[in-house]
Each structure stands twice: as C-alpha cells, then as structure tokens.
C-alpha cells in the first residue's frame, strides 16, 4: 500500500513538475509570473475533452488537441495581458504589479467563460486505459506508468531543446541579460512568443496527465493546479528548474501520502501548509541577511 | 427594500475596500481579506448571542484584527511578490480547513446567526466613522511615513521609520475593518459560505482599490461603489459578473497602470514632502 | 593603410547623426548632436563621466528613446534609418553596441557567449579563421571554453565581450552586410595595460578590414591616440573636433576634464 502511494504521488508529481517547468520558462524569459497559467492548463484539458466529443477519442490526438488549445490560450493571454504592458526586466518595478493584476484579470475572464460554457460540475474525462500490472503485491495502473514515461520523455526533449539548440541558446541568453541579447541581434519578442508556446505546450501535456489520474476536469482546476504550481515554483526557487521539479515530486508524494493515510479532504490543506511553511522559513530566514 | 439591500452591500464593500487599501499604502498586496472578513463575521455572529449587536460587530472587528495580524506576522519578512502569494495561499488554506470543519458549518457554510439586520443604519454608522478616521489619517505624519515606505522600504528604514511595525499596523487595522464588514455581512445575508474565505473573494476586494486607484482613500471607495452597483444594474449571472470583473482588471491596468488616484497623490505629495 | 578592395564604404560616410536630442524627464542628456563617421575609420568621442557618451551609443542602437533627430547608416546610396527600428534589427544589420557593464551572459559558458551572436543570425556562418585569431590574442578564452562566463574576472569578461564583437563583425564581413559599425563603450575600463594593448590590436584589425569604429572613452590618451578623428564631448554637446593627434594637445581637452578655463 505504501509503495502504491509512492507511485501515485510520483504520478501526480510529474504533472506538477511540468506545470512548474512551464512557470519557470515564462519567468526565465519574460521575468514575470503569469497568474493565468492555470487557466491555460485548464483550457488544454477542455480542448481535449471537446475534441474527444466531436472529433475522435484517440489518445494521441487528444494530447495534441490539448497542446494546441493550451498554446492558443497562452498566446491570447500573452498578447492581451502581458505584452501591452511592456518589457519588464526588473522584478520589483511597479509595472510588475500591473502584470500580476492583469494576469489575474485574464484568469478570471477565462475561468468564468469556461464556467458559463461547461458548468461548474466535474466533467468525466475518458481514461485511456484501465489496465494495470502487478509487481509482487503492488497493483500499478498503466496510466501511472504512461504518465511517468511521458514526463520523462518531455523532460528530456525540453532539456535538449534548451541546452543544445540555437533556440535554447537564445532563450537562455534572453533570460540572462535581455538588453545584451537585443544588442547581439536576438529578436526578443519572437523568442518571448516561442517561450509562451513552449510553456503552454507543457501545460497542455500536464493537463492530459492530470485528467488521467483524477478522472475528471472542471473549470476550477485551473485555479487549483495553477496556484499549487505557483507555490511549488516559489518553494523550488523562481527560475530554478531543477528545484521546481524536485519540489513538485515531493508535493505529489506528500499529497498521495495524505490521501492514503489521513484523509483526502485534508490533502490540499497539508500541501499548502507545508509549502507555505517552507516559503516562510526559507525566505524569512535568508532575508535577515539584508 | 431592494434599494435598501443594495445600499447595505455597497457600504459593506466600501468598508472592505478601505481595509484592503491600508496595506496598499505601505506598498503591500494583502490578498487575504476574504478570509479575515469571514472569520470576523463568524465571531460577530457568535458574539451576537451574548452582547448587543454593536459590541458584537466590534468583536468581529477585533477578531479580524488578530487574524490579519497573525497572517502579517507569518509573512513578516517576505518581500512584496512573495508576500502577496503567501497571503493568497493562507487564505486558501483557511478555506480548506473551514470546509472540513463541522464547527464552522462545513461545506455548506456557517449559518448560526441570531438576528438579521435590515436597516442600513449599522453599516452607515460604521462606514462614516471609518471615513472620518481616514480623513484625519490621510493628513497625518504617519501617512507620509507610509508613503515613504511604499516608495522605498530601505530608504524609509534608514530614515528611522519602523517599517515592519507600520506594515503590521496597516495590515491589522485593515483586519479590523474587514472583521466589522464581515459581521455586517453575515447579519445581512445570514450565511458565510466557505468560498468567501478563498482567493476569489479576496481578489474582488483588492479590485476595488485597483480600479479606483490607491493613492487616496477615496479611490477604493469609488471602486467599490462602481463595482458593486454596475453588476446589479446589469443583472448578470455570477459567472458573467466575474468575467466583467476580469475585463475591468485588464482594462484598468492598460489605461491606468498605477490607478488613477495614485498619480495625483504621488506627485502632489512628493512636492509637499520635498518642500518640507 | 591597406584599403580592402571589397569594401564599398571605405572613406565614405557610413553613419550620419543629425540634430539628435535625448531627454530623460526634464534633463537634456544629448543636445542637438551632429556627427558623421566614415567607413574603416576610428572615431573617438572622449569626455568625462556623465557627459552622455553611453547614452549616445545606446541611442544609436535604439536602447534609449530619442526625442528628435536623424540617425542613419549609409552604403552605396542605400540609407537605413535607425531611429525607429528595434535594437535586434539594427544589430542584424551590422551595427553593434558593446556596453560598458553587463557585457557578457553570466550564466552561459564562454563558448556559448561567443556563439550566441551566430544563434541570432538567419544564415549559419563559419568564421574559423577569426576564431583562431581570437584564441591567439586571448589564450584564456580557449582554456575556459566550457566554464560559465560569470566565473571570469571583470577584465576577462570585457575581453570576452570584445572577442564576441570581433567574431560578429567578421561574420558580417563574410555575409557581406553593407553596414558595419562597432560602438565600444569604455572598452578599457578596468583593464590592465597589457589587456589595453590587446584591445587596441583588435580595434586596428577591425578598422583595417573596413569596419567603422566609434570609441566612447574616458581615457582620452588611449582613444585619441588610436583614432583618425575625434570629438570632445561635454554635457551632451560636442565641444571640439579634429584629428586624433591635434586634439590630444588641444587645451580644451584639459578644460573639459579638469574644469580649467583657458
């Protein structure tokens, strides 16, 4: 039972890791935190659902639908709420507050449009496979294994993209020193758009993973997972990809263990409580050195 | 009768707007007043069984003050962005805890109310007294100190201003206002649902200040009045109302990135301060 | 001076700045500045700190907002106005600004710092001979190729930035980009005399191959010694102009730096 919970936790942690990676990509390149990212994620999930209902329930195609839906939403958010407020390279500048507010506005609009369109109830999401394998006394669902494999695959691909390709080099340069990147000829706006698409695609994949493990989706999932993802990213360190992934996995484990051994309704409370304590402990203590 | 209720809602929202305005004067986004208000409401409702209503409302205010102060202490040394996120998180945390607690009514909400207020006299009295206090506050030296803190915390500290104490003061004072508003709310509506504790509600309170501007206390009041009346006149369903709110946020950041009242305040006040 | 046959702009005006004004709020940083640079020449703009030299360099590549005036690069009758273009477009056209501070990508490796410019160009370029030159001039670069640029000393970071600029200019030469202008903002700041010598070698090689170079410097002796033409800059205006050698002995130079009235 313990082992199964660990695997469950890892499965959810994988999805959180992808969300955290998405936040980090945006933060790294644009130096803002997109508080509408949860809604991008939710849009991906619903795009897949709508696709399944009207076109085809093929898993691979649904994944693609989710990625496309999330990307379109991500670009929409970028061009409506982020770009018009100008380039923000200093995290503490007053414009940054405007971006926070404007992305919150965007998230409200998107979430409530989805509420109007789909209703507030949790919609069942088709499971791709109900099979499971048995290892000793453990009963592992196929879905979990697929989740883990997909995450690892995506992780390696994105890592390769960022480290070995020209595009990745440009993104890292922009993230390091935006002004200098402009002076050497990097089209910062185009690369910003690319990073938006990349992070939205990550959200789309995460949406599929979550929909598999939780069995249902609702317009509120954007708030819930988006916010959790945000807190995870902050604990892991904004901009710190590895830290975000590790924190995500730990959070997944924490949630699974709470659900298994305490009660599922306290799951979120425990997760938030632990994460908040971490933030407070880590940031309050280190800032004393100021 | 209907107009009566709208008037009450407008006044309660005005008080809430003022509560969120106070931390904004020291440059902090405290996105937790939904939870503060709800706690204040619960305490006020319980107290109303034992003491007369005005006193019960004040108890709600004190509870709000203590709770907001606690959250402020938890976030004692966090910088602005983290501060906002953690207050948001604490609000959500409180919501989850409340939803699971039978004593607080569980998922259906807290309904243990002894009396329902019908007349707008209580909200009016409280709102007017708060407004009077704020008029004096805006002219005070402390307000100027707050402005310095908002402009640059490090500089303010080097001038001898007790930055962190003032911040806590602003947050707790806001907590008192929110607590009173919560008490007024629960005695008008009769119930506090768990979602009032959460982030949506806290964001809506923040929005009053963001739309109206947060340089002078009139800004949030104007924002509260506009944002409470307009959806009523437009008769939207809840979701569209929130879509409308979101659009308002988007527009306001485009048109007035710093809120339309704050520019006026900053420029004239900075000139005054430079003169002195 | 050997005149490269393939360079169409040699001796002709490549950069024209006319009536440029830059203001920050109520302060005028640059006041009606007019200046032109010829292809293949080194032009020095010297003046004390705060005169506005950096602002001028940044204004050319549109890193600061300009209020009025004309900034154009010329070649063979083609004129490219720079004022409204985004900085990366200007850089892709061969006008490169090397800042005084933060001139390197701290988190990228030395190798990546050198390559980052090519990552932005549309056509893949091979500049192997230029690379060998760079490693000869700056051996420490080849020793530390995979290390993060943040681990280099301040002077080494500057040299890295210059090396990158050199490679970029060579790449533009290969791509036959018509407008080639390099703006160096205080390239000697914080460097040892030996390193400064290397910098002057680089500058000479570049101008020898037809790149126009604008040197914004506080160290008047170095800049004017290297330059064909110079301007003394103070408070946003050009106070005196002339050939490099003439200006070195000009009395207004000391007046500008030391406030001595002549």
Image: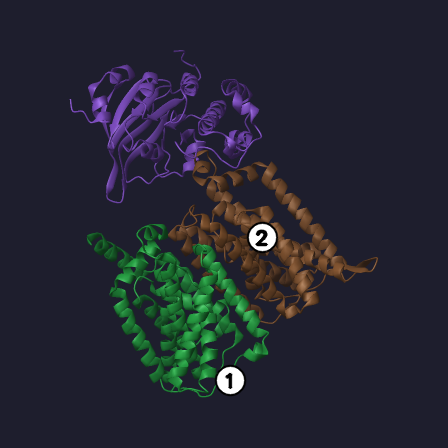
Chain colours: A brown, B green, C purple
Q: Residues within 10 Å of mark 1 (few under 14, many from 20)?
A: some
- On the image, the x and y values in percent for residue A62 come to 66, 57
Q: Quadrant of the C terminus of chain C?
A: top left
Residue C188 is left or right of residue A46, and the answer is left
Give the distance between the C-alpha atoms of the residues marked 2 and 1, in whole angstroms. 41 Å
Q: Are marks 2 and 1 on the same chain?
A: no
Q: Residue at x 22, y 22 (%)?
A: C254
Do the numbered discs 2 and 1 sit on residues whose CB atoms are within 8 Å?
no
Relative placement, left or right, of C53 versus C157 is left
Residue drawn at 46 percent across, 37 percent down: A181
In the image, residue A197 above or below residue B147? above
Element carrying mark 1? loop
Residue projecting furthest to the right: A136
Q: In which quadrant of the rendered view does residue C147 lie?
A: top right
Q: Chain of mark 2?
A: A
In the drawing, what numbered circle is on residue C198?
A: none
* Residue occupied by mark 2: A20
Q: How many marks overall?
A: 2
**Letter of the chain that mark 1 sits on in the rendering:** B
**The quarter of the displayed image where residue B224 is located:** bottom left
Mark in front: 2 vs 1: 1
Q: Nearer the viewer, residue C62 or A248?
A: A248
**For the view shown, which residue lies furthest in the top direction?**
C2
Residue B234's place in the image compared with A259, above or below, is: below
Q: Identify residue for label 1.
A: B112
- Residue C6, given in percent of the width and then of the height, sits at 44, 17
- Numbered disc 2: secondary structure: helix
Which corner quadrant holds the N terminus of chain C? top left
On the picture, is A93 further left or further right than B135? right
- Residue C239 visible: no
């Amino acid at each position: 039972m313990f082992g199964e919970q660990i695997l469950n936790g890892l499965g959810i942690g994988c999805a959180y890791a992808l969300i955290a990676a998405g936040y980090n990509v945006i933060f790294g390149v644009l130096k803002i935190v997109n508080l509408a990212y949860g809604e991008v994620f939710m849009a991906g999930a619903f795009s897949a659902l709508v696709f399944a209902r009207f076109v085809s329930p093929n898993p691979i195609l649904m994944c693609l639908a989710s990625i496309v839906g999330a990307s379109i939403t991500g670009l929409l958010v970028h061009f409506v709420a982020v770009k018009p407020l100008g380039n923000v390279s200093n995290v503490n500048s007053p414009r940054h507050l405007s971006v926070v507010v404007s992305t919150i506005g965007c998230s409200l609009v998107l979430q409530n449009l989805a509420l109007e369109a789909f209703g507030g109830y949790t919609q069942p999401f088709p499971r791709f496979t109900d099979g499971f394998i048995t290892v000793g006394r453990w009963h592992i669902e196929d879905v979990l294994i697929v989740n883990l494999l997909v995450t690892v695959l995506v992780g390696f691909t994105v890592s390769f993209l960022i480290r070995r390709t020209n595009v990745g080099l440009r993104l890292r340069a922009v993230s390091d020193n935006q002004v200098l990147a402009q002076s050497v000829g990097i089209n910062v706006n185009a690369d910003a758009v690319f990073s938006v698409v990349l992070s939205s695609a990550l959200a789309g994949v995460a949406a599929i993973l979550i929909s598999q493990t939780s069995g249902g989706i609702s317009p509120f999932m954007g708030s819930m997972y988006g916010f959790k993802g945000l807190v995870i990213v902050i604990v892991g360190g904004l901009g710190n990809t590895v830290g975000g992934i590790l924190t995500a996995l730990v959070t997944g484990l924490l949630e699974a263990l709470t659900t298994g051994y305490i009660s599922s309704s306290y799951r979120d409370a425990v997760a938030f409580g632990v994460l908040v304590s971490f933030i407070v402990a880590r940031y309050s203590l280190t800032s004393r050195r100021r | 009768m209907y107009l009566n209720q709208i008037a009450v809602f407008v006044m309660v929202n005005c008080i809430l707007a003022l509560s969120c305005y106070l931390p904004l004067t020291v440059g902090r986004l405290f996105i937790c007043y939904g939870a503060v208000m709800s706690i204040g409401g619960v305490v006020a409702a319980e107290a109303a069984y034992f003491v007369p209503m005005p006193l019960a409302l004040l108890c709600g205010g004190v509870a709000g003050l203590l709770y907001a102060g606690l959250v402020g202490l938890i976030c004692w040394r966090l910088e602005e962005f983290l501060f906002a996120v953690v207050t948001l998180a604490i609000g959500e945390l409180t919501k989850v805890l409340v939803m699971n607690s039978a004593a607080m009514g569980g998922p259906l909400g807290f309904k243990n109310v002894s009396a329902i207020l019908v007349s707008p006299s209580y909200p009016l009295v409280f709102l007017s007294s708060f407004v009077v206090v704020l008029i004096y506050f805006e002219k005070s030296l402390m307000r100027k100190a707050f402005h310095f803190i908002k402009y640059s915390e490090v500089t303010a500290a080097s001038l001898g201003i007790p930055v962190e104490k003032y911040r806590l003061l602003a947050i707790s004072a806001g907590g008192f206002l929110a607590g009173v508003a919560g008490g007024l709310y629960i005695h008008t509506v009769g119930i506090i649902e768990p979602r009032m504790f959460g982030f949506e509600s806290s964001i809506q309170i923040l929005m009053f200040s963001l739309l109206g501007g947060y340089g002078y206390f009139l800004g949030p009041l104007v924002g509260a009045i506009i944002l409470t009346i307009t959806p009523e006149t437009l008769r939207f369903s809840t979701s569209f109302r929130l879509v409308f709110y979101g659009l308002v946020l988007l527009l306001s950041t485009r048109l007035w990135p710093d809120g339309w009242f704050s520019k006026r305040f900053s420029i004239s006040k900075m000139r005054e301060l430079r003169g002195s | 001076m050997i005149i490269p046959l393939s360079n169409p702009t040699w001796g002709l005006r490549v950069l024209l700045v006319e009536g440029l004004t830059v203001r920050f709020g109520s302060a005028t940083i640059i006041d009606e500045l007019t200046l032109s640079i010829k292809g293949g020449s080194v032009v020095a703009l010297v003046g004390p700190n705060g005169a506005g030299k950096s602002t001028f360099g940044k204004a050319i590549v549109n890193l600061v907002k300009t209020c009025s005036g004309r900034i154009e690069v010329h070649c063979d009758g083609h004129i490219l106005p720079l004022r409204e273009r985004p900085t990366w477009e200007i850089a892709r056209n061969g006008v490169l600004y090397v800042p005084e501070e933060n001139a390197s990508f701290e988190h990228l490796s030395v190798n990546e710092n050198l390559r980052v410019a090519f990552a932005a160009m549309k056509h893949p370029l091979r500049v192997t001979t230029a690379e060998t030159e760079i490693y000869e001039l700056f051996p420490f670069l080849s020793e530390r190729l995979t290390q993060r640029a943040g681990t280099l000393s301040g002077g080494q970071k500057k040299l890295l930035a210059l090396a990158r600029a050199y490679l970029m200019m060579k790449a533009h030469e290969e791509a036959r980009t018509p407008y080639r202008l390099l703006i160096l903002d205080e390239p000697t700041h914080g460097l040892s005399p030996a390193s400064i010598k290397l910098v002057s070698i680089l500058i000479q090689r570049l101008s020898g191959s037809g790149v126009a170079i604008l040197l914004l410097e506080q160290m008047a002796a170095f800049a004017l010694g290297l330059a064909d033409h110079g301007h003394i800059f103070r408070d946003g205006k050009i106070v005196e102009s002339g050939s490099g050698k003439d200006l070195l002995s000009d009395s207004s130079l000391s007046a500008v730096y030391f406030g001595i009235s002549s």
